[in-house]
Amino acid sequence: MNKKIETSKTVEKGEAQMLSVVNRRLFLRSAGVATAMGAFILGACKDDDPVMQGDATVDLGSGDTGVLNYAYALEQLEAAFYTQLIASPYSGMSDIEKTILTDIRDHEIIHREFFKTALGNAAIQDLEVNFSSIDFSNRASVLGAAKLFEDTGVQAYNGAGKLIKNADYLLLAGKIVSVEARHAAVIRDLLNPKTTDFAGDDIIDANGFDKAVAPGDILAAVKGYVKTTIMGSNVGK
Amino acid sequence: MDIFKLIDDFQKVDGDAVGRLEYATRRQFMNRLGGKIATVAAPMAFASIVNKAFAQSAAAVDVLNYALTLEYLEDEFYKAGLGSSGLIPASDRAIFTQIGKHESAHVAFLTTALGSAAIAKPNFDFQYKGAFADVFTNYNTFATVSSALEDTGVRAYKGQAGTLIADPQILEYALQVHSVEARHAAVTRRLVASLTGNTAMKGWITNNEGAVPAIYAGEDNKMQGGVDLTGLSGKSNAAITEAFDEPLTKEAVLAIAGPFLA
């Protein structure tokens, strides 16, 4: 894949924004806090530093690179969710559930690392997630969030397909979206076993079609789960 | 199924097909999430494209009717299963009723698009020339064939995606059906795992494991986008193969589906 596209622009924009925030804080806050912020600036200036993204903005970029970064962003979100879920299991998690959720965690990490590797220098920075609305000790809360993430993932890939110009990338998206759909069905079956919910009328229309949702709508839907501001207005363009 | 190839063929006989389709349907498709207008309008818009192709190419009709044949296959399979007294336990009927409903909807979509040119329903041999002789009397066999059909459907759709890259709205249709097939596949695979006590069988496909080798050939691929994923993030090869579903060529799908035709 092309490792040059958009990278430098994205990084520069992110750093400029961060520095602007930091400078504002330096003026507003005490000397003691400013010292801590000094360390922040040094950290943020390293291109490969994925940690300090407090209220940073990332631009997914344009064209196919934008679509791939869009997928990478969603996979980052999913991988972080399942990693936390397995690290702090909800009370009463059965062995079967643990096996399933660990599998899904691994798939999402593999997806994330695949995109990171494939995008190379064009990859967006690591996103900072915000799962404060999810009660990780509560099964219904966790599986409800899992269902949302998986259904959203399916709809996102379905909606992004027609934006992809390179047939190899399109096939890659196709290879992943059906796995996300398998996840969605299994999570839904855990929530409501042996019902129609795995492919319920709430998401499948009268033609027997899953939904396809545009990047802008998907990013708005997941906004509450990401501290980093994600700009995706040029994805696929 | 081969709806992708079809559209490509239509393009050859009707070079303006995609342009007119986009013109006719852009707004309805964009509003798909909004309501039923899109549901009603889509097959009609599609039909106008298909009908023009009919006038020029018998080959295009053959291909489209072949796609309909495959949709009939799935639809009839579930109708026969649901109609076989004592086959599907009450506890599992909701699952197969829902899957059958979706397959019927796919058939309806295509028959509406084809109009009077739609072929009559073929006769099927669900016993697969004897290989699945007890498919409608043995629930394990029925569920296994169901999961195999769904996994095949996922691979068949995926294998044609690239062909549709110049036909964005039809591509989107295809993707929307593709992920429904994958949902079906996951839930039926878990049913089979439970019925047969095969704990290694999951909602996702591990390596190239499966009851019918041809259906799972190549699913053990670990090279994606030119990247060898072996050892990625310390994850197992099994997990890596589960994380990506692989396509099947039309020829491979035809070879698998052929024995179902009576």
Image (tube, rainbow, N blue to C red):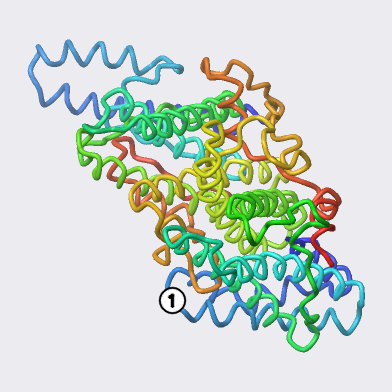
Q: Nearer the viewer, residue B137 or B17?
A: B137
Q: Amino acid at mark 1?
A: Gly
Above-or-below relation of A117 to B146 = above
State which chain disc 1 sits on: B
Image location of residue B93, percent across then percent down: 47, 63
> Does residue A61 appear anywhere in the picture?
no
Which quadrant, please, contains the N terminus of chain B?
bottom right
Numbered disc 1: secondary structure: loop
According to the picture, the residue beneath numbered tag 1 turns out to be: B35
Residue at x 24%, y 24% (from the top left corner): A22
Residue at x 45%, y 37% (from the top left corner): A73
Report whether B39 appears left or right of B19. Answer: left
Residue extending farthest to the bottom is B116
Above-or-below relation of B168 to A82 = below
Report whether B89 appears left or right of B129. Answer: left
Residue at x 74%, y 62% (from the top left corner): B126
Above-or-below relation of A119 to B255 = above
Image location of residue A15, percent across then percent down: 38, 26
Image location of residue B4, percent across then percent down: 75, 61
> Does residue B245 appear anywhere in the picture?
yes
Which quadrant, please, contains the C terminus of chain B?
bottom right
